[in-house]
Image (cartoon, rainbow, N blue to C red):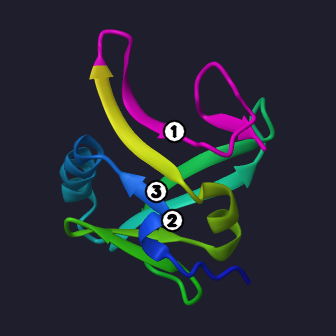
Amino acid sequence: MFYLKDMENLVQLTPKAITKIKEISQEHAEQKGLRLAVTGGGCSGFSYKMDFDFKKDKDNELIFDGVKVYIDPKSTIYLKGIVLDFQDGLNGKGFVFDNPNAKNTCGCGESFSI
């Protein structure tokens, strides 16, 4: 199991990401928080996964301006240091992961390798 001493620096959410998550979570009122995870797959080896979910026993829990974020211990290793942003410019709209640990990323930004 992976325990992080400095939970505040595990991940960061930008104000735009927090606002959008709050907006979307209104449609998922039965769920308790945002789950960030990493799964195997994608064109670069690992893929980001986001969903609304309930907290599980061993999850790391972070709170950003009332937004609860759950990260399982295995994903914690890969997500440490990321910044989650929401962009809505001319070149697209959606959540963007800025992962300082990623050695390679795919063109769509949804998968990475370490």
Please, what is the three-letter code of the amino acid marked with disc 3? Asp
User: In the image, residue 38 lies at what x, y percent?
Assistant: 66, 55
Report if residue 113 is visible in the image: yes
**How far apart are the alpha carbons under marks 2 and 1?**
13 Å
Crowdedness near tag 2: few (<14), some (14–19) or many (≥20) residues, C-alpha within 10 Å: some
Q: Earlier in the sequence, mark 1 or mark 3?
A: 3
Residue under the image location 54 percent in, 55 percent down: 81
Q: Residue at x 58, y 43 (%)?
A: 99
The residue beneath circle 2 is: 10
User: Under tag 3, what secondary structure?
Assistant: strand
Q: CA distance from mark 3 to mark 2?
A: 18 Å
Q: Amino acid at mark 1?
A: Asp
32, 6: nearer the viewer: 6
Which of the 4 quarters of the picture holds residue 75?
bottom right
Decide if residue 81 is on the left or right side of residue 92: right
85 horizontally vs 2: left or right: left
Tell me which numbered mark, 2 or 1, is placed earlier along the sequence: 2
- The stretch of residues the image draws in magenta is 89-114
Which residue, given by chain and number where applicable, does mark 1 sit on? 98
Position above or below: 89 against 105: above
Q: CA distance from mark 1 to mark 3?
A: 18 Å
